């Protein structure tokens, strides 16, 4: 019988709650299990969910939701410190604006808006991801990273973390796409949008993440420059991250 912990925790009041541990990182060292988790928002946790999560010993939650999103659903784990790193949502508003302008929305429109939102994480919100890494260098783990759906702002953040720890590109892509297996789309969200558009919004595609990394290349030259110049991760900080989150 394997001693490997389950990657996905099946919760009633939250979906896509996953562990980033177990992946091969720099020099073949494995990302530590039960240190960094990702999820959708934690505002609807049931008592049974809390019973599952409490033994994890979570110290911190890093919340990328915007102001109104945070007010709508506060964290259901009273004992952990919540750190707000706000990235205001733009996707639904952009699609609603197109709809109001008389444009008949299609999945292509949704894909375009989704990709542009990922580019904007780099263009306008690098400071939020820089703050996340500053926290990761401190004694904050075990921790959970989330936004509302836990798939886009959270997905990009987790891809950056895995890259910083030396996890191979193909493994990062596979982890990112696990959202399509575990995320449960809110059936009432953005109900005025066409069903095929909502299906795009409730999933992830490799092209979304690729758009963010294309923006990194355009604005910073390459990922290593983004780590150092955008996220404040020099060689010393990278070594500290590796010591904290990789097995010896």
Image (cartoon, rainbow, N blue to C red):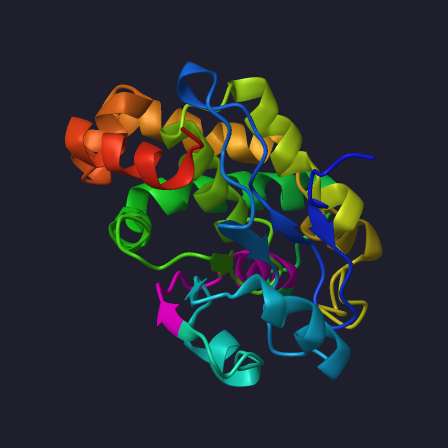
> Which residue in the rendered view is the most extreme toward the top?
27
Tell me residue 85's x, y (percent).
35, 63
Quarter of the image where one finds residue 239: top left
Q: Is residue 160 left or right of residue 135?
A: right
Tell me residue 47's x, y (percent).
72, 83
Quadrant placement of the N terminus: top right
Instruction: Specify whether residue 211 is painted magenta.
Output: no
Q: Is residue 166 left or right of residue 21?
A: left
Q: Residue at x 32, y 24 (%)?
A: 223
Q: Is residue 192 above or below residue 212?
A: below
Tell me residue 210's x, y (percent).
51, 27
Q: Residue at x 50, y 65 (%)?
A: 58
Quarter of the image where one finds residue 226: top left
Q: Residue at x 29, y 55 (%)?
A: 135
Instruction: Specify whether residue 87 is painted magenta.
Output: yes
Quadrant placement of the C terminus: top left
Where are the magenta residues, as a range? Answer: 82-99
């Amino acid at each position: 019988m394997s001693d490997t912990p389950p990657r996905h925790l099946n919760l009633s009041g939250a979906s896509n709650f996953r562990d980033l541990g177990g992946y091969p990182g720099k020099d073949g060292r494995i990302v530590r299990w039960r240190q960094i988790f990702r999820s959708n928002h934690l505002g609807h946790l049931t008592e049974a969910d809390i019973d599952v999560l409490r033994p994890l010993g979570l110290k911190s939650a890093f919340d990328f939701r915007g102001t109104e999103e945070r007010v709508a659903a506060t964290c259901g784990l009273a004992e952990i410190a919540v750190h707000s790193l706000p990235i205001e949502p733009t996707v639904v508003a952009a699609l609603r604006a197109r709809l109001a302008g008389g444009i008949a929305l299609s999945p292509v429109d949704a894909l375009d808006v989704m990709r542009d939102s990922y580019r904007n994480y780099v263009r306008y919100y690098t400071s939020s991801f820089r703050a996340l890494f500053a926290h990761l260098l401190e004694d904050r783990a075990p921790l959970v990273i989330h936004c509302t759906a836990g798939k886009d702002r959270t997905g990009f953040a987790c891809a950056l973390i895995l890259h910083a720890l030396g996890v191979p590109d193909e493994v990062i892509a596979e982890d990112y796409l696990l959202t399509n297996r575990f995320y449960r789309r809110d059936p009432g969200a953005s109900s005025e949008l066409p069903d095929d558009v909502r299906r795009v919004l409730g999933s992830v595609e490799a092209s979304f993440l690729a758009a963010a990394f294309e923006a990194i290349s355009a604005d910073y030259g390459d990922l290593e420059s983004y780590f150092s110049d955008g996220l404040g991760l020099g060689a010393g900080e990278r070594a500290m991250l590796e010591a904290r989150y990789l097995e010896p």
